Image: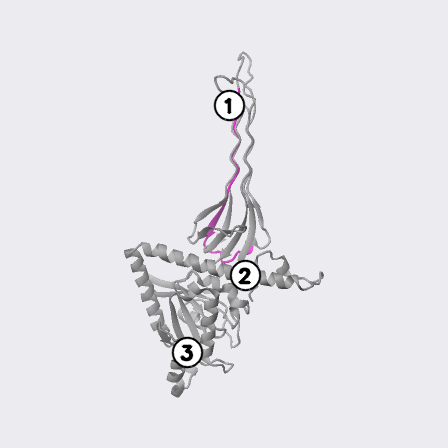
Amino acid sequence: MKFVDEAVIKVHAGKGGNGCMSFRREKYIPRGGPDGGDGGDGGSIFLVAKDGLNTLIDFRYTRNFKAQSGQQGSSASCTGAGGEDLVLQVPVGTTVLDHDSGDVLGDLTEVEQRLRVAHGGFHGLGNQRYKSSTNRAPRQTSPGQEGEVKALRLELKVLADVGLLGLPNAGKSTFIRAVSAARPKVADYPFTTLVPNLGVVGMSADKSFVIADIPGLIEGASDGAGLGIRFLKHLTRTRMLLHMVDMLPIDGACAADNAVVIERELQSFSATLYSGERWLVLNKLDLVPADELEERCAEVIRKLDWKGPVFRMSGLMSDGTKDLCAAIMDSIDAQRQCELASPELIETQEQWRLQVQAEARARIDELADSRRRQRSTVQVDPSSDDEDDDNDGVEVVYAE
């Protein structure tokens, strides 16, 4: 299956129908007067967020969409039929931008939320509209207006309360499997996660939260290395991040140094996201010798100069996972209570998220421009089948 989280499409709203020039002609009714009707309005184009969709794959190959035009008016004061609106379904969490200007047109974060992205053309006027006391037989009509034409950039960002951050094989997918019904792939080699995964953690009948796992980051990710940079934008909607650290890496690396690498890459990607709430989770403690446990944990905290919450656990053995989930639920509940007590906090948080998304978008665009410049300096074999050259802004990742 293909996971597509970006697409560039072109939408063309319908043209308004032309007005009609006609005069009433009936037996025994002289000087019937003008009776040309107006045209119909052109159809508009809407995007609607649908539950159950989790990819923009529908826009991978079909990229041009045109709404129906309005019909021309007719005699007997008949108005032309309006063009039918075109409704395109997108996943919940889709951000819509004007591809040319970069302006955000809307954010579809709720099921069945609708956004008009192209307005249909206004109808033309028939000659009966121009009738007056001094112009009894007008021969004037107006044409219908053209519908709006826009190039849109669609960006899908998963909706989650908590985002997982860490190197490949840090145990993020194992943690989701341990606390939710999600079953992402888990193996003893890096990059088993190729696309974002979501897990719903149910704490009680009426309390739950959603965790998002993205492909692991590596050193140089903020400069385009690895897979993680493509998906870091999915963490821009979360309330908090969990920085998960493998306390006994399989390659023998220092856990503290690995943690510093991730913090540095996150800061390079978005300074605003780096300043948000983030918890440190020391994972795979069941593999660390008991006599080295405290020293290793202290070293990670010291090298990071960590001031926030710290949790210790083993995702595979489910040790400490309940305490971590309970603390997350308490934190989310406290945030929601603060939002109810001070509604202005919602606006502040929304501005924060918009800033994070703007920084993430700028960083991704910068890397894309850099790749295009590099490709332009390399002679490409015309016989090669390179999908990326034809992607035209669509980001595709293949999952097993």
Q: In the rendered image, which quarter contains the N terminus?
A: bottom right
Left or right of residue 350: residue 222: right
> Which mark identifies residue 366?
2
> Which mark identifies residue 130?
1
> Which mark identifies residue 185?
none
Q: Looking at this rendering, what residue extends furthest in the bottom direction? A: 291
Looking at the rendered image, the disc whose residue lies closer to the viewer, 1 or 3, is 3
Q: Nearer the viewer, residue 258 or 285?
A: 258
Identify residue for label 3: 303
User: Magenta span covers which residues?
Assistant: 34-57
Q: Nearer the viewer, residue 131 or 249?
A: 131
Mark 2 and mark 3: span between their CA atoms? 30 Å
Q: Secondary structure beneath disc 3? A: helix
Residue type, mark 3 in image: Lys
Instruction: Where is residue 241? Give x, y as percent.
Output: 41, 67
Is residue 1 in sight in this rendering? Answer: no
Q: Secondary structure beneath disc 1? A: helix
Instruction: Where is residue 286? Give x, y as percent.
Output: 41, 81
Mark 1 and mark 3: span between their CA atoms? 79 Å
